[in-house]
Image: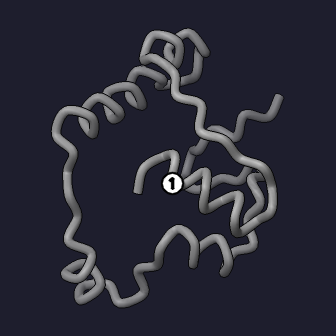
């Protein structure tokens, strides 16, 4: 699923307008986000190596694996800031 697909799915499920607006790595780094270099490195890795996932095999290991659309519907998330991992940065001031 591409980031553009994520935005399209988010808009379809939530009814909230969403648009993928690509930016260059340098622009992203210019945002001054904590650990922004880690995010850019992740983007570069995916662009250069395009790792494929075997979702059928993953679902055998983890039957509860859900699609982004299913996850959105189950959680009712509508884009509000939310911690998703220990020590996550929320972006709140």
Quadrant position of residue 58: bottom left
Q: Is mark 1 on a helix, strand or loop?
A: helix
Colour scheme of the rendered structure = one colour
> Vertical placement of 35 versus 11: above or below?
above
Circle count: 1
Residue at image point 71% right, 53% down:
82
In the picture provided, is 43 more to the left or to the right than 36?
left
In the picture provided, is 32 more to the left or to the right than 67?
right
Q: Picture coordinates of residue 9 (x, y %)?
A: 60, 62
Within 10 angstroms of label 1, few (less than 14), some, or many (20 or more) residues? Answer: few
Q: Picture coordinates of residue 4 (x, y %)?
A: 52, 46
In the picture provided, is 17 more to the left or to the right than 21?
right
Residue at image point 59% right, 31% down:
21
> Vertical placement of 62 versus 1: above or below?
below
Locate the N terminus by quadrant: bottom left
Residue at image point 61% right, 51% down:
7
In front of the other: 35 or 25: 25
Locate the C terminus by quadrant: top right
Q: Picture coordinates of residue 29 (x, y %)?
A: 49, 14
> Vertical placement of 36 versus 91: above or below?
above
Dot 1 corresponds to which residue?
Answer: 5
In front of the other: 92 or 10: 10
In front of the other: 8 or 88: 8
Residue at image point 23% right, 64% down:
53
């Amino acid at each position: 699923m591409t980031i553009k697909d994520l935005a399209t799915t988010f808009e379809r499920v939530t009814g909230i307008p969403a648009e993928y607006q690509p930016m260059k790595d340098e622009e992203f780094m210019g945002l001054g986000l904590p650990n922004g270099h880690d995010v850019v490195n992740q983007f570069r890795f995916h662009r250069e190596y395009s790792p494929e996932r075997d979702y059928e095999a993953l679902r055998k290991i983890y039957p509860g694996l859900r699609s982004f659309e299913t996850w959105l519907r189950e959680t009712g998330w509508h884009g509000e800031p939310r911690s998703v991992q220990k020590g996550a940065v929320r972006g709140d001031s």
